[in-house]
Amino acid sequence: MSLLGTFDVGTTGLVAQSLRLNLIASNVANAETAVSSDGQPYRARHVVLQSEARAGRIGQGVKVARIVESTAEPRLEYRPGHPLANTQGYITMPNVNPAEQMVDMVSASRAYQFNIEMMNTTKQLMLKTLDLGK
Amino acid sequence: MNTVPQFDSLKFGEAALKLRSLRHELLSSNLVNADTPNYKARDIDFQSVLMQRLTGQTSPSSVSLDRTHQGHIQMTSSLQSPKQMFRVGVQPSLDGNTVDPDIERGHFVKNAFFTEAALSFLGSTLRTRLSAITGQPS
């Protein structure tokens, strides 16, 4: 029954959007991390979403195809006394753009909310179907 | 002139409900993929697909298999999914996605409402028949 399939579609959306939110949290938390685990300045990470066809079903889910690191130029900060500073006195800071992250967060959380709402609607329709003929 | 075709209300209700739930899944997949690059919003022509299912006709554009040998597996009409069409985007985005969340949400809510309507019509048909069988008012 297609109504049950909607739950699967909704679940793929929840998983993908929560991973997206997770990466946004990581980006915001590491916005000032000059040295990450690989010794380089932290780079912003983004998800690449991809639709996922399911055999014999009309609805397509969504999945995170891969996680990419932003190729934007790192931010240079003038801190002459800092141990990581280069000869001109600049240190390389992460390329996390706070405005971009905020917009992405709003988009991800709205998508998550609507997935929940969609599944609630489906649940109500299924409960009504169970009451059919009563 | 009788323009409204007459169908058995149980058969009609069943076909309508099946198609409504199919469209429900299709619209939910549009919404889930609202942020997927290059995803195109899809929908079905509900009225014509319902008519095809009720009259038993298949659409001329739907794919069917010819059986040239008796050992070939017959493709039943239930396996054929209705023809999907792409929605024309009002504000296409730069990443090639044509899902407009507001439009899809509107269709989704409308479809859910009509599913409930179909359920209540089918329920009342069932109750009417049950009271005719048992002779008791429902």
Image (tube, rainbow, N blue to C red):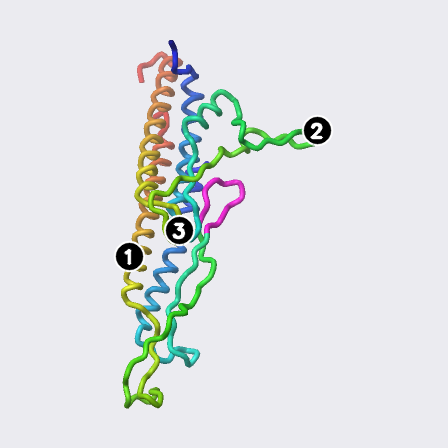
In the rendered view, would you say B90 is above or below B123? below
The answer to which of A110 and B132 lies nearer the viewer is A110
Question: According to the image, label 1 marks what residue?
Answer: A106
User: Tag 3's secondary structure?
Assistant: helix
Q: Residues within 10 Å of mark 2 (few under 14, many from 20)?
A: few
The residue at 43%/59% (across/down) is A48
The segment highlighted magenta reads A51-61
Q: Are marks 1 and 2 in contact (CB under 8 Å)?
A: no
Q: Which percent across, then down, holds residue B37?
A: 42, 53
Q: Single out the mark in the foreground, 3 or 1.
A: 1
Q: Quadrant of residue B134?
A: top left
Query: Label 1 is found on which chain of the structure?
Result: A
The residue wearing badge 3 is A13
Instruction: Give the Cα distance between marks 3 and 2.
Output: 43 Å
Mark 1 residue type? Val
What's the amino acid at mark 2? Thr
Residue at figure coordinates x 63%, y 30% from the top left: B74
The one of B104 and A3 positioned closer to us in this rendering: B104
Please give the name of the residue rendered at 50% of the width and 41% of the height, measured from the top-left corner: A57
User: Disc 2 sits on a residue from what chain?
Assistant: B
Query: CB atoms at circles 3 and 1 under 8 Å apart?
Result: no
Above or below, comparing residue B72 to residue A104 in the picture = above
Q: Main secondary structure of the magenta part?
A: loop
Check if mark 1 and mark 2 are on a common chain. no
